Image (cartoon, grey):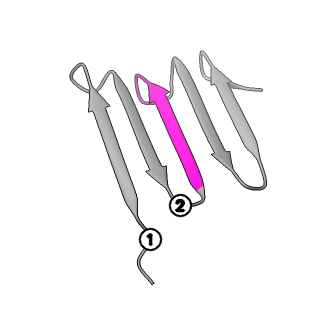
Amino acid sequence: MFDQRKELSLFLGVFNAEFERNRTRWGVFGGILLGYESTSQMTDWNFYGFGI
């Protein structure tokens, strides 16, 4: 089966997002300033390049 993947990029790439069947990722300035990733098994936030 094929995985469905959608991508979104706004404001010349300042905000980007990826949506897949089992994973969601989004970030500001490539995830350096702010980032988020979520799967069915984990969630990860990044603020100013530091993982929490």
Tag 1: residue type? Asp
CA–CA distance in space, label 1 to label 2:
7 Å
Residue at screen point 27% across, 25% down: 10
Which tag, 1 or 2, sits closer to the chain's start? 1
Q: Which of 36 and 6 is in front in this view?
A: 6
Q: Nearer the viewer, residue 27 or 32?
A: 27
Residue 43, compared with residue 48, is above or below; it is: below
Residue 43 to residue 29: above or below: below
Q: Is mark 1 on a helix, strand or loop?
A: loop
The residue that disc 1 covers is 3
Spot the residue most to the left.
12
Residue 25 is situated, as x and y percent measured from the top left of the image, at 53, 41
Q: Tag 2: Cα neighbours inside 10 Å, few (<14), some, or many (≥20)?
A: few
Residue named by callout 2: 21
Q: In this view, does 37 lie to the left or right of 5?
A: right
Quarter occupied by the C terminus? top right
Residue 12, position as x, y percentages in the image: 21, 23
Image check: 43 left or right of 25? Answer: right
Q: Which dot marks residue 17?
A: none
Instruction: Tell me: residue 8, above or below residue 45.
Output: below
The picture places residue 49, in percent across and down from the top left corner, at 60, 22
Q: Give the range drawn in magenta.
A: 23-30
Quadrant in the picture for the N terminus: bottom left
Residue 38 counted in the magenta span: no
**Three-letter amino acid code at the position of disc 2:** Arg
Asked if the residue under mark 2 is in contact with the one under mark 1, i.e. CB atoms within 8 Å, the reply is yes
Q: Where is residue 29 in the image (x, y as percent from the top left)?
A: 40, 22
